[in-house]
Image (cartoon, rainbow, N blue to C red):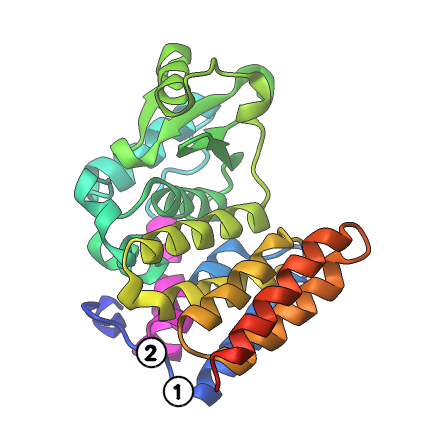
Amino acid sequence: MREHWPAMRHPAPPPPGRSAELRRRFAEEARAERPDLAALCLLTGAVGDGTLDEDGLDAAQLELDRLAGQLPYRPGTPLAWARAVGALLGERYGFRGAAADYQRLDSSLLHAVLRRRRGLPILLSVVWLEVARRAGAPVYGVALPGHFVVGFGEAAGQVLADPFDGGRVLTGADAELLVTGATGARLDPSMTAPAEPLDVVLRILNNIRAWAALRPERSDVALWALDLSLLLPAHPARLRHERARLLVERGEFTEGARALEEYADLVAAVDEDAAGQVRAQARAARARLN
């Protein structure tokens, strides 16, 4: 099925009608009783890459199914599951990451990660999660600060694996080192709790925004990532302010001013001074139309 997946160099967004439909589907899936992580990640990719059509979306799901079908039947303990998934995805198929992957937008898009077998830790973890889940594994994402991994089994016998390192099983010292290296703090047990699917999606979108922030010429990417973030049922209110300011930076002064005014109305109930500052930003944006 991989022939349906587009090669990704400088992706252009889909036409407006297609984009609106994809966003509608994203919002609907995000509000489902049990949001489908793979579907949300693939819809994210389709919003950013106009060449990812329905055949490509289906092919990616089928590839996850195909990979899951190659896992051994219920290998047993959490450690056995972790080793089996790592042997398949990391060793046999070569899914892993490298420092250079942080410089690529497609490292954050699931369809491209499935094609390249390279990506950021969180997207490689999505591959691990979706393949293992389909095979019946007790698997979940673990949002360690600065480095996303996967967990197998209940807390008392939890086994962590690092898909970015080909699925290497982590010792307690390994996990401690990852957290200390990212934050300078010690590993807290709360950090290894299962991550909710929508939290995973928001973190992926945050990564996309961070990539775009370093590339002002790709403010279009930052904008669609913000738009999708705001479609999630729970999101930081500050993202509305960020989106409004981005519109102004892009020269969309009327829409940006309107968005700033809407955000000011939102925060006025709790901080009138902050609302006044935002309204001043809106007036400044409108003044740039003259």
Alpha carbon of mark 2 to alpha carbon of mark 1: how far? 7 Å
Callout 2: helix, strand or loop? loop
Prevalent SS, magenta region? helix
Most extreme residue toward the right, as rendered? 269
Q: What amino acid type should be assigned to the residue bearing mark 2?
A: Gly
- Quick check: 270 above or below 255? above
Q: What amino acid type should be assigned to the residue bearing mark 1?
A: Pro
Q: Is residue 109 visible?
A: yes
Residue 217 locus on image (x, y percent): 27, 67
Q: Is residue 118 visible?
A: no
In which quadrant of the rendered view does residue 121 lie? Answer: top left
The 10 Å Cα crowd at callout 2, few under 14, some 14 to 19, many 20 or more, is some
- Quick check: 272 above or below 195? below
Residue displayed at 42% across by 38% down: 73
Residue displayed at 51% across by 52% down: 201
The 10 Å Cα crowd at callout 1, few under 14, some 14 to 19, many 20 or more, is few
Callout 1: helix, strand or loop? loop
Q: Which mark is residue 15?
A: 1
Which residue does the numbered mark 2 point to in the structure image? Answer: 50
> Disc 2 vs disc 1: Cβ atoms closer than 8 Å?
yes
Residue 71 locus on image (x, y percent): 36, 41
Residue displayed at 47% across by 71% down: 248
Q: Is residue 56 magenta?
A: yes
- Quick check: 190 above or below 121? above
In this picture, which residue range is highlighted in magenta?
43-68
Q: Is residue 217 magenta?
A: no
